[in-house]
Image (cartoon, helix red, strand yellow):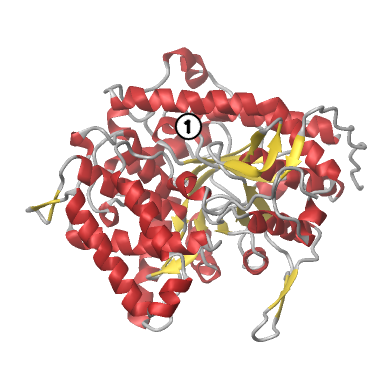
Amino acid sequence: MEVRAPAPKPPSTTAKLELRGPRSPAAAQVLPPEALAFVAELARQFTPRVQELLARRRERQTEFDRGRFPDYLPETTRIRTSEWTVAAPPPELRDRRVEITGPVDRKRIINGLSSGANVYMADFEDATSPTWQNLVEGQLNLCDAVRGTIRWVCPDTGRIYALGPNPAILFVRPRGWHLWEKHVLVDGQPVPGALFDVGVFLWHNGAHLVREGKRPCFYLPKLESHREARLWAEVFAFAEDLLGIPLATVRATVLIETIPAAFELDEILWELRAYSAGLNCGRWDYIFSYIKTFAEHPSFVVPDRGAIGMDQPFLAAYARAVVAICHRRGTHAMGGMAAQVPIKDDPAANARALDTVRADKLREVLLGHDGTWVAHPALVPLAREVFDAHLSGPNQIDVRPAGGPPRAFDLCAVPQGPRTLATLRHDVEVSLRYLESWLRGVGSVALFGLMEDAATVEIARAQIWQWIRHGARLDGTVELTVSLFERVLEEEVDRLGAELGAAAFQRGRWSEARALFHRACTARRLPPFVTSLAYERIVTLLPPNQE
């Protein structure tokens, strides 16, 4: 029997709203006055809370810088020690053994939904450069995907891309609380990017999904506390009420991507318990968060990023904690990303990459994860093969790992390994290539056999900043100074210029990428997010009130 949502309640906001983004056919379609009014309602209700929580993040980081390390919260002991569970997984979300992620462009959405994975996560955050064009076209693409009408014609070959049978379930990853949408102002202030992304998607698709017997699903990034999870629960409840869809229809999986969040896993699930669809080990951003959290401490200097694998004690403890707590609370514990892409011109290297993916997925399923992530459709069969071989049902939520919660010491254990000049050069090259693409509006880039997103640059520049800050010695002898870093940076820029040719280099945004990366690596204090620094360079504002 078809479920029909009640008619949406009319927005009651008196907020002054300004649309400063360039006009386009996509913007006109996805941002009618009613949708903008809904976003304004969310912004006026919740922007002050976002600002308060971001201020608390800054205060907390100052405490870490001064020597107070993360720990479990004494005031929430009762939540951690009492017995309770979150909302049970609805039937359509019980089996999530393989999930694929990517940006919100039409081709990648179609390929992801048709890949054979259980879930496609459309990513407005790390895999999408938040240009106005990308955001509004991405929302239009998702509207078409929800309705099954999405198609794309390759301009070079004429090949038509459309959804295959049994498409994956769509999850949407909005931007984190720290990112703003400056193309939309409410009462003269930018709207939180997260509220814009979720608001536009829900206004267009929330009631439609309910009528189809489905539900809106989200991945929530970069949370640093259970209070931030509480805010999301309140946003969902407020939006559901305003749109006239049943309470607790939305489901959301939280990406555990920060060290502070790892100490509040129970509390995050508790706050989202009516909406929860589990937790995910967002391990790449988690490595970045480790460096950022302990940036000012010389005893926490990390090794080459290639040496920071899941066998490092701090990552192993974190993964065990996610599985144990999710299963205790009756929900999914999702594994991390396999970022490898096919290496078509080197069969031996491709075989080694596939062996790496297979070993990683085997580790996850044996640890107790209920599913995993891949970045490329070619990896879906491999990941499914590994999980199929070890899952006797749709998930293993009923499997409870032995042992209690990890000690704070284990979650903060310093990773061990070499620090090398070769990694410095690789970090610089990959970051320059990625940032230049990001500035051109491309946020997901295949580089050296991996599908890279913003987390790559965040790890690289935080690592270099930390090495410079504490005078780390590379290859055991060479101290990394600002002058050495600048020399390597200029050498890599020159080499890229020679590789591309003068004309192509000048057409790109390499000088801006170089300046951004230099600032991110040499600032007096570690900038919280390089994407926040770069955002001003992609904002395209119309004059106020221009029609």
- Residue type at mark 1 is Glu
> Where residue 264 appears, x then y in whole percent?
46, 27
Q: Secondary structure at mark 1?
A: loop
Q: Residue furthest left?
A: 477
The x, y position of residue 347, in whole percent, is 37, 82
Number of numbered discs on residues:
1
Q: Is residue 465 left or right of residue 232?
A: left
Give the answer, above or below, for where 350 lies relative to 395. Answer: below
Q: Which residue is mark 1?
A: 224
In the image, taking residue 539 as reference, residue 262 lies left or right, namely left
Question: At x 26% / y 23%, what residue is drawn?
Answer: 67
Which quadrant would residue 352 be assigned to in this image?
bottom left
> What residue is rendered at 31% in x and 42% in y?
523
Residue nearer the viewer, 365 or 507: 507
Work out whether residue 338 or residue 441 is closer to the camera in this orientation and state it.
Answer: 441
Give coordinates of residue 443: x percent, y percent: 52, 59
- Relative to 517, does residue 217 appear above or below in the rendering? above
